[in-house]
Amino acid sequence: MRVICTERSQVLGAHLAHVLQVPVVNVKFSRFPDGEHYLLAGDLDDETVIVGSVVDNDALVQLLLLIDACEPSRTQLVLPYMAYARQDKQFKRGEPLSARVVAKALSRGVSEIFTINIHDPGVLTHFAVPAQNLSIAHDIGSYIKSLNLKDPLVLAPDDGALAFAGQVASVGKWEFDHLDKTRLNGTEVRMAPKTLSAAARPVVIVDDIISTGGTIATAAGMLYQQGATDVYAACVHGVLASGAYARLMATGIRDVICSDTIERACSRISAAERIAGAIRKS
């Protein structure tokens, strides 16, 4: 077995290879003068694990080329982050179901697919091969535990993420809740924990994805007003679009924590152990 990865997943790919104690395949990436992608994979094996997050269109094309380059080996695909996965419903006639399009394209040439905290597990049904969604909620909880926070409150940004917050909180047997929005008037909205108090305690807002960070930034300011001693933001996928990291830090958030499914400077948690465990069982 060997691990091979795209340019945007080198760190996670290397971590996974280290945990599995297998080599990493050297890949040369370049472009043709017209901008088209080209790659050349080194010493391949009969069994290959491809690691590639689809974070943009270039990453998608590169991953498709890498899958083709690994044929005819038995190939397992680790898809840590899948762009287009949130577009999983057709609201208007003529719209593509983008999650289905990308899932079908990535299914060709692989035997099995692993995703990490995919936004909607229903997307897995669009893959043409067996697909398994792994969760690193406990890994996030373990990292929070290492911070030695006193009586932290784990908060989901909405009730839809409450189950995820509960999984994170279970590591330290902490209290958890979700943020509730109350409209005060035509222009003002108050955000606070639904049932618990943030006063005199640290708060960790957790979610699967932090995209623009707008809701978390607004909530952080209000939580400080409500007496929170510190506010942290933690997620699996740090998309951090449109200056989100700076926006969050400007609100006084103590730290932004994400995993290496999307490689960022604030990637403090690795999904490698969780992925390796699933591969060993497959």
Image: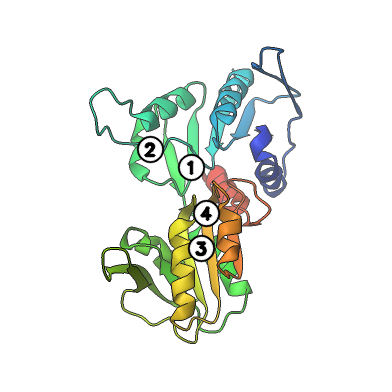
Viewer-proximal residue among 218 and 68: 218
Residue contact between numbered discs 3 and 4, judged by CB atoms under 8 Å: no
Q: Earlier in the sequence, mark 3 or mark 1?
A: 1
Residue 57, horizontal then vertical, whole percent: 54, 28
Rendered view: 220 above or below 75: below
Kindly identify the amino acid type of the residue bearing the numbered disc 4: Val
Q: Earlier in the sequence, mark 3 or mark 4?
A: 3
* The furthest residue to the left: 93
Residue type (three-letter) at the residue carrying disc 2: Leu
Given residues 32 and 152, the one toward you in this image is 32
N-term-proximal mark, 4 vs 1: 1
Locate residue 47: give its quadrant.
top right
Which amino acid type is shown beneath numbered disc 3? His
**Residue at x-position 43% and y-position 37%:** 131
Where residue 176 appears, x then y in whole percent? 40, 74
Q: Quadrant of the N terminus?
A: top right
Residue at 36% over, 38% down: 123
Q: Nearer the viewer, mark 4 or mark 1?
A: 4
- Within 10 angstroms of label 3, few (less than 14), some, or many (20 or more) residues? some
- Looking at the rendered structure, which numbered label has been put on residue 115? 1
Check disc 1 and report its element: helix, strand or loop: strand
- Mark 4–mark 1 distance (CA, rounded to whole Å): 12 Å
User: Which residue in the protein does label 4 denote?
Assistant: 236
Disc 2: which residue: 124
Does the CB distance between marks 1 and 2 fall below 8 Å?
A: yes
Distance of label 3 from label 2 (alpha carbons): 22 Å
Mark 3 lies on residue: 138
**Above/below status of 24 relative to 270:** above
CA distance for labels 1 and 2 = 9 Å
Mark 4 and mark 2: Cα distance apart in space = 18 Å
| Image location of residue 142, percent across then percent down | 57, 68
